[in-house]
Image (tube, rainbow, N blue to C red):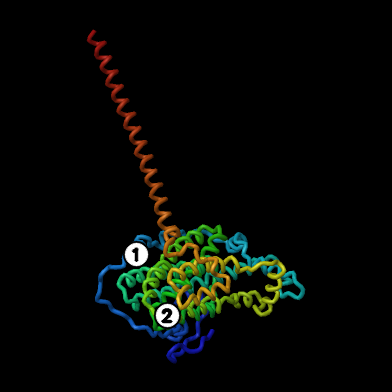
Amino acid sequence: MTFGTAAGGGTMNAEPEPGSEPEPGSAAAPSRTEMDASITVIKDNADRLFLWDYGRDRGQLVTLYNKAMGSQWSSVTDLDWSTPVDPERLVAEQQSPILALARVAGTLPGSPLAAWSDKEYSQLGIEFFKASLSQFMHGEQGAMMTAAKIVETVPWIDAKYYASTQTMDEARHTEVFAKYLHTKLGDAYPMSPFLKAQIWALLEDSRWDIAYLGMQIVIESLALAAFGDMLRRTEEPLLKKLLRYVMSDEARHVAFGVLTLSEFYASLSEAELLERQEFMLDATLNSRARATTPEVWERMGTTAEAVTPFLLEAAVQEKVNPMGGFARGFFAKLVPNVRKLGLLEANGGYLRQRWGEAGLLEFEFADDTGSDYETYDAVAADRMAADRMAAAGAAGTAGTAGAAGAAGTAGTAGTAGTAGTVGTGGTD
């Protein structure tokens, strides 16, 4: 899969099929050609900033940093990777809207899915699920690289400190999604061109705040909506806990963006703010039509071009939008966060007008993630529950020991009393 040339004229190497690489230590060291084929070069145009002011003067960022340090979790000890996963059952439990629509499309005259049985539809569900997790995996690596860029480019020490914790978070997320795919489902899918274009643009941009705006505000809001949608649909315990913990981190990341950018954007000119408003329009209204991963249909023996007309007809027939719930979840996160940045009102309410025409302002006063991120903290909730259970167990043990001790004391006293009575009798 070739992606042309990188910014600055360098050649991008062809990307391999993800998931096809051997496990570490299972084969001989790769050749230079193999290594080059597994790497894509991205040219970053931003300056790196070394700071001499170490003062901690942004209290909310200090609080968020402390929260991040206390909420780190382990991909090894906090997740039970011995949990068996049945992909067919996993998909059947989720009741995927796109899979339900495909079944309807298969009943339409001339449909390429007309001859499919339950076996093919079940496999389609598995492939769609693998495709979703693959985009999560690729997106998390992009988030890891973007967070690392923020560490290097943001001009505030408190923001550098927090971004360093996010870099660790995103590394852990990339690891767990890759491991779940590899050990529970099979081969991954390539990165979607839409996601790739979004992340590449952030990594190449010279403005540090655009990395924030694109990743912390747009992509992380998208991730929260996607993870939340999957979490609501799944009953698989390993995936459920994995998603809860990832969402705990992601909510803090969005809060990080809201806190930092709301301060920075207060100092920008109207012309500079207009650039950010146009960025938001391009990331939302101009890019709302997103094709499903075409490779899914190719693996199933057909093409997206052949199937899409029948999916659209089925959606009209059933009066459903299979992405409607997800889109609402995304904009319910995004719009209130953008309002808090001041971007809705800048330039005479330019973004407000455009989003209003698109019907997005209904979400304006939903909870912004800068305020409600602690409600996502499943890591803290699980640790508090474990502490309560431990305390209850300790109290129970102490109570049992106390009762046994009291019984023992009573028994000793009784024995002594009996002995005294016998002694008295002997004297008589």
Residue kind at label 1, given as amino acid type:
Gln
From this view, report whether residue 223 is shown above or below residue 272: above
99 displayed left or right of 81: right
For the residues labelled 1 and 2, say whether their Cβ atoms are less than 8 Å apart: no
From this view, report whether residue 168 is shown above or below residue 1: above
Where residue 364 appears, as percent x and y from the top left, is 51, 66
According to the image, label 2 marks what residue? 270
The foreground one among 2 and 292 is 292
Please say whether residue 178 is visible from this viewpoint: yes
The foreground one among 81 and 236 is 236
- State the CA–CA distance, disc 1 to disc 2: 26 Å
Q: Residue at x 34, y 83 (%)?
A: 47
Where residue 267 appears, as percent x and y from the top left, is 36, 76
Q: Which mark is residue 376?
A: none
Where residue 369 appears, as percent x and y from the top left, is 45, 64
In the picture, the quarter occupied by the N terminus is bottom right
In the picture, the quarter occupied by the C terminus is top left
Label 1, secondary structure: give it.
helix
* Furthest-left residue in this view: 427
According to the image, label 1 marks what residue? 60
The foreground one among 418 and 379 is 379
Label 2, secondary structure: give it.
helix
Write down the quadrant of residue 203 in the picture.
Answer: bottom left
Write down the quadrant of residue 8 in the picture.
Answer: bottom left
297 displayed left or right of 18: right
Where residue 202 appears, as percent x and y from the top left, is 44, 80
Residue kind at label 2, given as amino acid type:
Glu
Please say whether residue 116 is visible from this viewpoint: no
* Eye-nearest disc, 1 or 2: 2
Give the mark nearer the N terminus: 1 vs 2: 1
